[in-house]
């Protein structure tokens, strides 16, 4: 089909307002939030219903047009950015933003893919329930994007990743057929697990249009501590002690190095120091319970034990909601403060929790050797073994030399992680950024199975071409 005919058919399908074709209108959809990936597109289409998505895919499949789904565009791997050909279309889910139903008795709700994570959390809250996924980007990322990337975040230790939080899913396949599996069943062993396959597939196997999500009782009691620790091994010991002492009520355990705290205090207006003894490392730990428990004394006595054992140096327990929010703001502001400080060489890696100290020690040595212009800012979800092992540029050093270190550092860190039985992409996915890394580190049989699945479900290769797996240009 000629471009004009295709645009006309897309316009007929979604309506003129939902089809963006001018350079100005399209531009926000053609670059990722870090401005690392730039693309072009024939058009940005914003369907309002599953039926429109279905007809749109049937059309694109018929004429061989690549479709790049986009949610809140907060991803880190360029997965939502089209290629440079200008032949692909971006399918934005932003108009599909209805909460279809909330079932408090069943602890579930059904949300369309374009609902922001914050809107889903609010809908759960209105029903006196909790939707526990929690990310720094929650105001703008969408539930479809969270599912497509199998997002993690700060509550994985207690509640798991997105794959653990979905009961059902509605997906449109490449040919436009719809799998509607939104039932809230907790047990259903009838055939292959499509939901599990679609979650984490980054738009390469289907377009997620809605999901039935798992809700939980709301926490009634919360206790939060900012803890100074001498080293990562002590941090992991403190986590173990608190899990034991609290009957496993630790919901979050985030590791923050002094280098990250310094960046946040320097870059973020209004950031307040936690006031504990300065230390090379800190832990932000939160205990929650759905009962009316007094968690503060429990946390205090467990921390006193940790201080006596030498695993903790000092700790501050949040005495108000405001102080709790301050602690969390320090943690959540790390990525933005790193960006403001000039950007960083990023790695999103995981190992078994007990191996986190060894990973940091060995990784720090590699970073110091390979990037003399950098300093380490390794922080993150230590409670589940996931670190954002980033290296920032030292002020006054040459930015081009600093950037040129990236390939060698990445290779060394990812090889290290592989030898430690870990993952080179713990929670941010593959997108276009890590396609080569997947080829390097996945088992050949695994890669072959992935390619076979892709071929079976998307034989014309129209769904997010070139993402996750190398593909023919569409
Ligand atoms: P997008 O960026 O729009 O898309 C991501 C991928 O999903 C792309 O491949 C896209 O094609 C595909 N996709 C999007 N919607 C659909 C759909 N409906 N159907 C099929 N495919 C689709 N991530 C974490 O896991 N943990 C964190 O702690 C975390 N913290 C963050 C903090 C900040 C400040 C920022 C900016 C990002 C953070 N992220 C984190 C990364 C990001 O927010 C998540 O990966 C999020 O899940 C992406 O959602 P999105 O809607 O923005 O997706
Ligand atoms: C986080 O946990 O803060 C993010 O996943 C990492 C990042 O934004 O770089
Ligand atoms: Zn993270």
Image (cartoon, grey):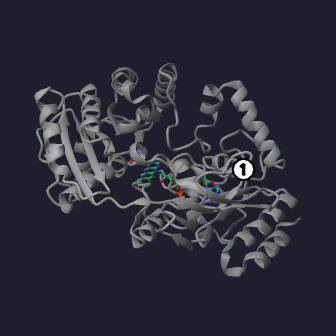
Tell me the quarter of the image containing the N terminus.
Answer: bottom right
Q: Residue at x 84, y 50 (%)?
A: 460
Q: Evaluate whether residue 36 shows in this view.
A: no
- Badge 1 element: loop
* Residue 365, percent from left and from top: 35, 20
> On the image, which quarter does residue 29 sit in?
bottom right
* Residue 275, percent from left and from top: 11, 47
* Residue 28, percent from left and from top: 55, 64
Question: Which residue is nearer to you in this view: 419 or 83?
Answer: 419
Q: Evaluate whether residue 107 shows in this view.
A: yes
Question: Which residue is nearer to you in this view: 113 or 187?
Answer: 187
Q: Residue at x 26, y 44 (%)?
A: 284
Q: Is residue 359 left or right of residue 432?
A: left
Q: Residue furthest bottom?
A: 16
Q: Is residue 275 left or right of residue 146?
A: left
Q: Is residue 5 left or right of residue 378?
A: right
Q: Which residue is mark 1?
A: 205
* Residue 147, percent from left and from top: 57, 53
Q: Residue at x 34, y 51 (%)?
A: 340
> On the image, which quarter does residue 144 sit in?
bottom right
């Amino acid at each position: 089909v000629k471009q004009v005919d295709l645009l006309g058919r897309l316009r007929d399908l979604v309506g003129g307002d939902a089809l963006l074709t001018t350079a100005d209108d399209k531009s926000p959809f053609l670059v990722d939030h870090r401005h690392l990936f730039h693309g072009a597109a024939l058009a940005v289409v914003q369907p309002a219903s599953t039926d429109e998505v279905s007809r749109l895919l049937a059309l694109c499949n018929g004429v061989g047009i690549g479709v790049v789904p986009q949610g809140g565009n907060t991803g880190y791997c360029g997965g939502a950015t089209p290629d440079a050909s200008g032949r692909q279309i971006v399918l934005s889910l932003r108009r599909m933003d209805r909460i279809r139903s909330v079932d408090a008795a069943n602890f579930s709700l059904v949300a369309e893919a374009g609902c922001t994570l914050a809107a889903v959390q609010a809908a759960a809250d209105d029903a006196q329930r909790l939707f526990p996924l929690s990310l720094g980007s929650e105001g703008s990322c969408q539930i479809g994007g969270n599912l497509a990337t199998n997002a993690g975040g700060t509550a994985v230790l207690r509640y798991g990743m997105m794959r653990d939080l979905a009961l059902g899913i509605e997906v449109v396949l490449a040919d436009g057929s719809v799998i509607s599996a939104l039932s809230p069943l907790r047990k259903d062993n009838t055939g292959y697990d499509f939901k599990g396959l679609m979650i984490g597939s980054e738009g390469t196997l289907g377009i997620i249009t809605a999901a039935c999500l798992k809700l939980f009782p709301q926490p009634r009691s919360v206790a939060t501590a900012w803890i100074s620790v001498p080293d990562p091994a002590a941090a992991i010991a403190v986590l173990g002690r608190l899990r034991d002492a609290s009957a496993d009520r630790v919901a979050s355990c985030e590791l923050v190095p002094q280098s990250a705290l310094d960046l946040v205090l320097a870059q973020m207006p209004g950031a307040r120091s936690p006031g504990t003894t300065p230390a090379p490392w800190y832990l932000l730990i939160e205990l929650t319970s759905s009962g009316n428990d007094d968690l503060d004394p429990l946390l205090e006595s467990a921390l006193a034990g940790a201080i006596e054992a030498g695993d903790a140096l000092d700790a501050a327990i949040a005495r108000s909601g405001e102080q709790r929010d301050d602690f969390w703001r320090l943690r959540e502001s790390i990525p933005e403060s790193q960006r403001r400080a000039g950007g960083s060489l990023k790695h999103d890696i995981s190992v078994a929790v007990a191996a986190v100290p060894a990973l940091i020690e060995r990784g720090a040595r590699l970073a110091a050797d390979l990037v003399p212009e950098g300093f380490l800012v390794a922080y993150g979800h230590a409670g589940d073994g996931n670190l954002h092992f980033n290296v920032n540029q030292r002020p006054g050093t040459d930015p081009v030399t600093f950037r040129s270190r990236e390939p060698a550092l990445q290779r060394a860190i990812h090889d290290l992680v592989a030898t430690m039985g870990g993952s080179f992409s713990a929670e941010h996915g593959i997108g276009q950024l890590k396609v080569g890394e997947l080829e390097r580190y996945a088992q050949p049989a695994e890669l072959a199975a992935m390619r076979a699945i892709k071929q079976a479900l998307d034989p014309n290769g129209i769904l997010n071409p070139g993402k996750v797996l190398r593909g023919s240009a569409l």
